[in-house]
């Protein structure tokens, strides 16, 4: 049985790895806020990147739904 590992790796590089890196970054910022709560700049950075991270997840789910609906019409 043949598995297309190249396609799976490309999918991981485009979807999962960037999100994991963003979660890691958000975790580092939260930990930095915990250590140094007087630095309010990091609250803004966290809110900024969290907004785009959550938006990225919502858009990905939306586009996956559109892709599923388009593929249903092909059969």
Image (cartoon, rainbow, N blue to C red):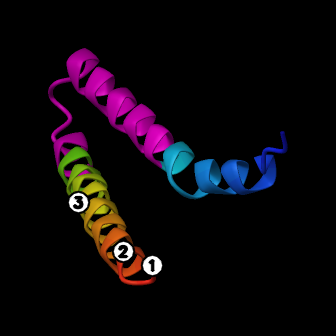
Is label 2 in a helix, a strand or a loop? helix
Q: Specify few, some or many for label 2: CA neighbours under 10 Å numbering under 14, 14-19, or 20 or more.
A: few
* Residue 58 numbered mark, or none: 3
Q: Is residue 11 left or right of residue 68?
A: right
29 part of magenta stretch = yes
Q: Front-most of 65 and 43?
A: 65
Cα gap from disc 3 to disc 1, whole angstroms: 27 Å
In the rendered structure, are the residues bearing label 2 and label 1 in contact, judged by CB atoms less than 8 Å apart?
yes
Q: Secondary structure at mark 1?
A: loop
Count residues near mark 3 (Cα–Cα under 10 Å), then give few for <14, some for 14-19, many for 20+: few
Q: Quadrant of residue 52?
A: bottom left
Q: For the magenta stretch, what is the residue range?
A: 19-45
Q: Which residue is mark 1?
A: 75
Disc with the residue nearer the chain's start (3 vs 2): 3
Q: Against 24, is 64 above or below?
A: below
Residue that label 2 marks:
72
Closest to the camera, between mark 3 and mark 2, is 2
């Amino acid at each position: 049985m043949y598995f297309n590992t190249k396609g799976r790796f490309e999918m991981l590089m485009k979807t999962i790895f960037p999100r994991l890196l963003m979660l890691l970054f958000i975790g580092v910022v939260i930990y930095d806020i915990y250590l140094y709560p007087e630095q309010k700049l990091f609250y803004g950075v966290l809110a900024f990147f969290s907004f785009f991270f959550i938006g990225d997840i919502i858009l990905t789910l939306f586009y996956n739904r559109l892709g599923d609906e388009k593929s249903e019409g092909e059969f």
